[in-house]
């Protein structure tokens, strides 16, 4: 049974009070403050507020009436410029195509001069003067680079994430761009898959809140504002579940898993107003996503009421031939457009074959017109028919780029994204007595790596390296010696040639800071790994350094969870800094020296070994659950050679202070549908520094018509406290927050018993019972 639209709205549009909208998630809740409303209306544009007018309808209808089939097909064609590409460049003469009206949108072209040049070809060279739409992958910054998306997700700070997208959009729009291919909202539980770095991690609730925040940030107040770009929620769908973590590989899962875990962030983004959506490269249940009418028509348009347009991923229509789904390009194009794909990215399949398909009656003119209308509507909303050059403004291109305010925001998000994983003996923050700091490792003096993959127009020479950031902060108080020491290249695994230099640099240091991780291109697209260890000879060097008997701080820089179990047992402190962006070294120094007290929390589980993958916090209990008190029993769901538990759990992250949680209190132990239960704790800063805690609420549904996860994140709140200060933190829960796809695939909560827990990570026990009545 298909859930009704109102039911789905409950699934995807409603959230708990905390984290439901950016200002709430980022705001402290004082005891006196009334709990915010359950349903938050997103601030950004929604389809209903896209500003459509009868005038738009009349204009676009009249235009379509004048168009030849070839002109219509042009509007459904998106080609890359020759500036950048992530796949085969199938057509060289894109400028001639623009002038001939064969292409309606161009990606990978930017800058005011170049977008004007191309726009001129379209509006002066073609019969109907239809302007081009310019797209680009503006993922985590355009020129001012922010942390990679997975890093930003570790901030759990919706305000910061929205602001990052806002700045990226401002910079991109100032260069003539109208459209970004972001946010990527693919849930991923497999760190072998390099594209995990582009998303928000493993969790459906956190991922949905972040999806909304990014859409609001990119699209700003109104579609058509010249400091905003259209968002593209991608990759629809289930791309993050690629078998064995190998990019572009098959995905296959139950419809329940799809709807409960993989689809909600897409729906959240669409409800927040995302204007466009991109299909994924993978097949799902045997049907490639770019011809999947269940996804593109039944779910997206009929259930969700999506009114924007659908674009494919790069040549993914053509790829249905090797998938074994289409016998040739012509058939692939028919399958795509009939399934609900509006625009063909880079494949030129519509361009080359669609006219014949229409002539043969394989594709109706009504289908073509509907797709063309969606594209032209978007150009109209952007105001391009009034002024095709309105985004290409030379003044803004100079003024709105890498401003001091943008760089300050990048630094702020970067330090908020850093997760302190371990800090034995409070070795961090670095003590004033640490007069000699040895900075070692292949990422210590790297600039290029600091901005990760999908770095848009971010300069790889511009970022502040860790060495620069740490030296600048240490000033005259400490000396910083540096040696690269090791390599992160796979081929260098057996080399030791840099070790002596590193040992010499560290010989009389008070503390060793090791900056290790992965080359920036080891995550992102086409960057899957079978092994999650630190590549090259980095761990071997770390083991050598350990023989010096000095405190060691490991700063991890990478786009995925790495397996670092030796380091977890043997070094004193570990922080995950991801790829922090343009202000990398400054932000890392802020945290190392304690100028910023870390508050990041893992958006993804860190496994002990690759053999545990996929590993995530909200799995099922099984019929033979393992627990420590049954360690002598064999026939339990366990490994012979490893604990079941990960290295670090989802939601984990330490601070330089400590927090105490009182027992949870409920205002009532039972609710009925429509009623609300209030769960509260008193959070106390029990340490000696001011600090920020991300308070997390998890629930468990004990018995269901289908089995339920052992834990599910349902809310989070950010609370900043002075030493000794306490605050009451309150969450509200109703049946709507407990909904899922039941045995008959209807959507809603089931009456019965539940437990909940409130704490600082997903390790919190959910042991406070409540029930939901009929
Ligand atoms: C990626 C997309 C990206 C597109 C355009 C593809 O290879 O999968 O995420 O938006 O290229 O650059």
Image (cartoon, rainbow, N blue to C red):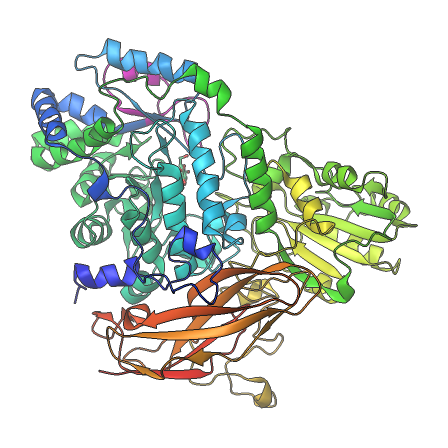
Residue stretch in magenta: 79-105
Residue 749 shown in magenta: no
Relative horizontal placement of residue 235, taking residue 370 as reference (left or right): right
- Residue 723's place in the image compared with 83, above or below, is below
Image quarter (top left, top right, bottom left or bottom right) of the C terminus: bottom left
Determine which quarter of the picture holds residue 221: top left
Residue name at image x 52 percent, y 29 percent: 143
- Residue 323's place in the image compared with 348, above or below, is below
For the residue pair 53 and 113, the one nearer the viewer reads as 53
Residue name at image x 71 percent, y 45 percent: 589
Relative horizontal placement of residue 10, taking residue 207 as reference (left or right): left
Instruction: Report whether residue 72 is seen.
Output: yes
User: Where does residue 144 sit, x and y in percent of width and height?
Assistant: 54, 32
**Looking at the magenta stretch, what is its main secondary structure?**
loop
User: Where does residue 304 sit, x and y in percent of width and height?
Assistant: 21, 52
Q: How many marks?
A: 0
User: Where does residue 505 sit, x and y in percent of width and height?
Assistant: 88, 45
Instruction: Report whether residue 619 is seen.
Output: no
Residue 99 shown in magenta: yes
Relative horizontal placement of residue 143, taking residue 268 as reference (left or right): right
For the residue pair 303 and 16, the one nearer the viewer reads as 16
Residue name at image x 79 percent, y 57 percent: 552
Determine which quarter of the picture holds residue 231: top left
Task: Kindly give the residue lying farthest to the right in the view shown.
Answer: 508
Relative horizontal placement of residue 343, taking residue 448 as reference (left or right): left
Q: Quadrant of ligand 1?
A: top left
Task: Kindly give the residue lying farthest to the front in the view shown.
Answer: 32
User: Where does residue 327 sit, x and y in percent of width and height?
Assistant: 24, 41
Image quarter (top left, top right, bottom left or bottom right) of the N terminus: bottom left
């Amino acid at each position: 049974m298909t859930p009704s639209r109102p039911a789905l709205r409950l699934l995807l549009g409603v959230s708990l009070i905390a984290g439901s909208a950016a200002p709430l998630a980022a705001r402290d809740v004082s005891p006196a403050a009334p709990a915010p409303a359950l349903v938050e209306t997103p601030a950004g544009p929604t389809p209903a507020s896209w500003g459509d007018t009868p005038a738009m309808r009349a204009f676009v209808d009249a235009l379509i009436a004048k168009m030849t089939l070839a002109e219509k097909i042009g509007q459904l064609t998106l080609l890359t410029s020759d500036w950048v590409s992530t796949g085969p460049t199938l057509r060289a003469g894109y400028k001639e195509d623009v002038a001939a009206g064969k292409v309606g949108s161009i990606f990978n072209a930017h800058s005011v001069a170049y977008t004007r040049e191309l726009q001129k070809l379209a509006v002066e060279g073609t019969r109907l003067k239809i302007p081009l739409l310019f797209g680009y992958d503006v993922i985590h910054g355009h020129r001012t680079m922010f942390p990679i998306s997975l890093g930003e997700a570790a901030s759990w700070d919706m305000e910061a994430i929205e602001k990052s997208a806002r700045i990226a959009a401002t910079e991109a729009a100032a260069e003539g761009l109208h459209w970004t291919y972001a946010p990527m909202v693919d849930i991923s539980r497999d760190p072998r898959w390099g594209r995990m770095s582009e998303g928000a991690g493993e969790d459906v609730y956190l991922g949905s809140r972040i999806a909304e925040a990014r859409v609001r940030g990119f699209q700003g107040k109104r579609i058509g504002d010249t400091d905003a770009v259209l968002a593209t929620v991608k990759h629809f769908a289930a791309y993050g579940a690629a078998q064995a973590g190998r990019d572009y590989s098959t995905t296959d899962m139950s419809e329940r898993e799809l709807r409960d875990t993989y689809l909600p962030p897409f729906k959240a983004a669409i409800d927040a107003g995302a204007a466009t959506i991109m299909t994924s490269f993978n097949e799902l249940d045997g049907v490639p996503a770019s011809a999947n009418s269940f996804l593109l028509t039944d779910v997206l348009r009929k259930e969700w009421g999506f009114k924007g347009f659908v674009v494919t991923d790069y040549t993914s229509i053509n790829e249905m031939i090797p998938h074994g789904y289409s016998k040739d390009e012509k058939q692939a194009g028919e399958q795509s457009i009939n399934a609900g794909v509006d625009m063909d990215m880079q494949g030129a399949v519509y361009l080359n074959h669609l006219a014949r398909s229409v002539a043969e009656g394989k594709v109706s003119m009504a289908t073509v017109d509907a797709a063309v209308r969606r594209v032209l509507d978007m150009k109209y909303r952007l105001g391009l028919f009034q002024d095709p050059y309105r985004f290409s403004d030379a003044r803004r291109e100079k003024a709105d780029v890498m401003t001091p305010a943008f760089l300050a925001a990048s630094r702020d998000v970067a330090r908020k994204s850093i997760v302190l994983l371990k800090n034995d003996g409070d070795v961090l923050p670095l003590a004033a007595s640490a007069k000699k700091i040895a900075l070692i490792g292949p990422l210590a003096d790297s600039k290029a790596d600091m901005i990760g993959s999908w770095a848009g127009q971010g300069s790889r020479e511009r970022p502040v390296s860790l060495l620069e950031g740490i030296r600048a902060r240490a000033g005259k108080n400490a000396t910083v010696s540096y040696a690269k020491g090791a390599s992160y290249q796979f081929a260098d695994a057996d080399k030791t040639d840099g070790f002596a230099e590193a040992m010499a640099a560290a010989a009389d240091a008070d503390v060793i800071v090791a900056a290790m991780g992965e080359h920036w291109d080891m995550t992102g697209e086409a960057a899957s790994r079978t092994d999650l260890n630190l590549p090259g000879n980095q761990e071997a060097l770390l083991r050598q350094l350990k023989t010096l008997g000095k405190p060691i701080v490991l700063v991890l820089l990478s786009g995925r969870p790495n397996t670092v179990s030796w380091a977890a047992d043997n070094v004193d402190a570990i922080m995950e800094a991801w790829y922090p962006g343009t202000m990398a070294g400054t932000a890392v120094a802020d945290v190392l020296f304690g100028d910023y007290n870390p508050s990041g929390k893992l958006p993804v589980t860190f496994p002990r070994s690759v053999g545990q993958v996929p590993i995530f916090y909200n799995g099922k209990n099984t019929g033979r659950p393992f627990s420590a008190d049954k360690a002598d029993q064999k026939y339990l769901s366990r490994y012979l050679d490893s604990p079941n538990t990960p290295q670090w759990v989802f939601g984990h992250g330490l601070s330089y202070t400590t927090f105490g949680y009182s027992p949870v209190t409920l205002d009532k132990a039972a609710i009925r549908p429509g009623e609300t239960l209030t769960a509260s704790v008193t959070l106390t800063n029990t340490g000696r520094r001011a600090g920020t805690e991300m308070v997390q609420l998890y629930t468990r549904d004990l018995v269901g018509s289908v089995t339920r996860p052992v834990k599910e994140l349902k809310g989070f709140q950010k609370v900043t406290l002075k030493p000794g200060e306490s605050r009451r933190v309150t969450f509200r829960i109703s049946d709507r927050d407990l909904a899922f796809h039941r045995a008959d695939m209807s959507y809603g909560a089931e009456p019965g018993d539940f437990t909940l827990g409130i704490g600082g990570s997903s390790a919190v026990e959910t042991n406070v019972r409540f029930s939901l009545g009929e």
